[in-house]
Amino acid sequence: MTIETHHGRGYVYCLHYHIVWCVKYRHKVLTPEIVGDLVQILEKIANDNDFEILELNTDTDHVHILIDCSPQHFIPDIMKAIKGVSARLLMKKYGDTLRKKLWGGHLWNPSYFITTVSENTEAQVREYIKSQGKKD
């Protein structure tokens, strides 16, 4: 698999990040219906913030995405948009259901995991993300 490089004004780049974040208290609240809405929300956030989601999958208590972004993107800002907007919209739609398992009104754990992905590891990361939510 060939990683696509992008050209900026005076530079060439390829920045792929594997990002994982969890539901607060690791409660298993990500149902297929909620995940369907979450995917749409994340795609809109990516479009609005000019980064691309290359791979996305969930289990019932966490989310994995592989993104492609530019050097101008600041990861904490991306995460603030992803987690803040998605939590607000999902709580608005599924608040009664989610609040039964999540006290305090918070959907996401405040932390996240992030790692860079190279052309040597991209295929492995994509397969790992695709395998999320599947039983062994």
Image: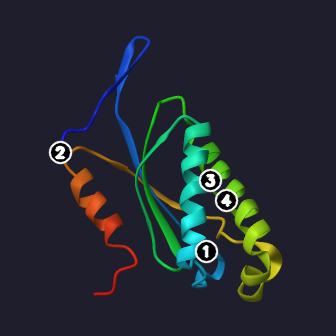
Question: In this figure, which residue is indicated by the disc labeled 4?
Answer: 86
Instruction: Tell me the tag on residue 23.
Output: 1
- The answer to whether mark 3 and mark 4 are in CB contact below 8 A is yes
* Amino acid on which the number 3 mark rests in the picture: Ile
Name which residue lies at 73% across and 61% down: 89
Quarter assignment of residue 97: bottom right
Query: Mark 4 or mark 2, which is nearer the start of the sequence?
Result: 2
For the N terminus, the image quarter is: top left
Query: Mark 1 or mark 2, which is nearer the start of the sequence?
Result: 2
Question: In this figure, which residue is indicated by the disc labeled 2?
Answer: 1
Q: CA distance from mark 1 to mark 3?
A: 13 Å
Residue 4 lies, in percent from the top left, at 28, 33
- The answer to whether mark 4 and mark 1 are in CB contact below 8 A is no
For the C terminus, the image quarter is: bottom left
Name which residue lies at 26% across and 64% down: 127
* Amino acid on which the number 2 mark rests in the picture: Met
Q: CA distance from mark 4 to mark 1?
A: 12 Å
* Amino acid on which the number 4 mark rests in the picture: Ser
